């Protein structure tokens, strides 16, 4: 009998969450990341077509999507490519209501509304806008600035911004062509599009004309220099009680994030706290 082989389909925002949950909660490290779109740009990700080569009755494909309504379609799609094995739905684990980080955004948004906290909201590091959708949904009446190149990185830009981050470099490079296909118009549909302000290009160059203040900022730029620039730019613009959330603080693939946050906090006398949500998110609160 063959050993178990397992994979996650599709990838992206929910797939990453599923991957971490499987590892943290069950000690399962999926061997295959399956996603037709990302397979074109990232050699570590395979397409559905490649599943056909796996001849194993102990194959398990975990489906990760926060859209319960499309699970049957996804299952049918996978079944066209596997001849043996089973498909397992992760919807009960991976959905908006189970996402503690989204819950934190929802609670903060409600709290800020109830105390009438002024200031806009922002995300720097947007990709397709998977997390930005939640910010836009819950901070429903706030202006949301979205900063990204929306074209991935170019070699030289990343190299000069890197601190021991070859892995991040590879990942971001692989997005390059994908972004060209996607374009800014390819950002996921937003619940309150009238509040979105796209700042396309290299941050912080794209922020020079911004005079606004902020009550909530999500920094998700993976690398040291972008994170440090984000902290410097937004900190002085945060209203009192405003919150900066930093993705990937506890993430071995993005050591520059922790380094930037630790240096910034030490230099500015800021305390750091963490969200128990499996993605290593750190939180900074602005005081007087
Ligand atoms: C991990 S992805 C963001 C994921 C996103 N928050 C989500 O919900 O899926 C990191 C993004 O940061 C962007 N980025 C990093 N540094 C940047 C900079 N200095 N200027 C513009 N974009 C940057 C990259 O282009 C990439 O899209």
Image (cartoon, rainbow, N blue to C red):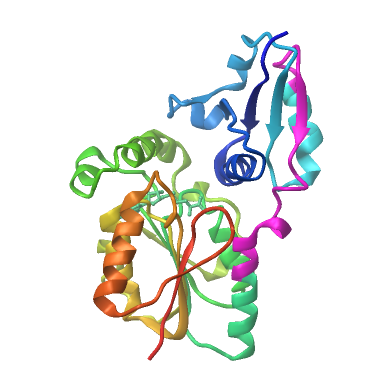
Give the percent coordinates (x, y) of residue 181: 45, 36
Taking the magenta stretch, the answer to whether it contains residue 90 is yes
The part of the image, by quadrant, that contains residue 72 is: top right
Determine the residue positioned at 60% across, 91% down. 115
Between 187 and 42, the one lying in front of the other is 42
Above or below, comparing residue 116 to residue 121 in the picture: below
Q: Which residue is drawn at 54% across and 77% down?
A: 142
Asked if residue 16 is among those painted magenta in the image, a careful observer would answer no
- Residue at horizontal 69 percent and vertical 48 percent from the top: 94
Which part of the image, by quadrant, shows the C terminus? Answer: bottom left
Q: Where is residue 240 in the image (x, y as percent from the top left)?
A: 43, 88
Q: Which of 85 and 136 is in front in this view?
A: 85
Q: Is residue 239 above or below residue 108?
A: below
**Quarter of the figure with the N terminus:** top right
Asked whether residue 176 is in view, the answer is yes
Does residue 201 appear anywhere in the picture?
no
> How many marks overall?
0
Q: Taking 118 as reference, is 105 above or below it?
A: above
Q: Is residue 17 left or right of residue 253?
A: right
Residue drawn at (55%, 41%), measured in percent from left and top?
Answer: 12
x then y, percent, for residue 62 = 70, 32
Question: What range of the chain is rendered magenta?
Answer: 79-105
How far across and how far down the image is residue 17, in percent?
60, 46
């Amino acid at each position: 009998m063959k050993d178990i082989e397992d994979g996650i389909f599709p990838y992206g925002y929910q797939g990453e969450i599923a991957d971490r949950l499987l590892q943290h909660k069950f000690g399962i490290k999926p061997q295959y990341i399956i996603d037709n779109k990302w397979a074109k740009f990232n050699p570590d990700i395979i397409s559905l077509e490649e599943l056909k080569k796996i001849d194993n009755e102990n194959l398990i494909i975990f489906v990760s999507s926060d859209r319960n309504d499309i699970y049957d379609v996804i299952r049918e799609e996978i079944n066209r490519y596997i001849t043996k094995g089973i498909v397992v739905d992760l919807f009960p684990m991976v959905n908006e209501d189970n996402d503690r980080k989204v819950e934190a955004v929802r609670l903060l948004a409600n709290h800020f509304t109830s105390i009438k906290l002024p200031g806009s909201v922002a995300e720097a590091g947007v990709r397709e806008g998977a997390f930005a959708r939640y910010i836009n949904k819950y901070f429903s009446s706030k202006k949301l600035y979205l900063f990204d190149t929306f074209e991935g990185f170019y070699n030289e830009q990343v190299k000069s911004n890197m601190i021991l981050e070859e892995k991040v470099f590879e990942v971001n490079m692989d997005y390059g062509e994908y972004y060209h296909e996607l374009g800014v118009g390819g950002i996921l549909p937003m619940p309150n599009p009238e509040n979105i302000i796209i700042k396309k290009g290299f941050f912080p160059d794209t922020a020079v004309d911004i005079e606004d203040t902020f009550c909530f900022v999500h920094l998700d730029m993976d690398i040291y220099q972008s994170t440090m620039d984000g902290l410097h730019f937004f900190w002085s613009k945060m209203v009192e009680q405003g919150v900066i959330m930093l993705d990937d603080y506890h993430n071995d693939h993005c050591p520059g994030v922790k380094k930037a946050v630790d240096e910034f906090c030490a230099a500015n006398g800021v305390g750091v706290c963490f969200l128990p949500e499996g993605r290593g998110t750190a939180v900074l609160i602005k005081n007087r």
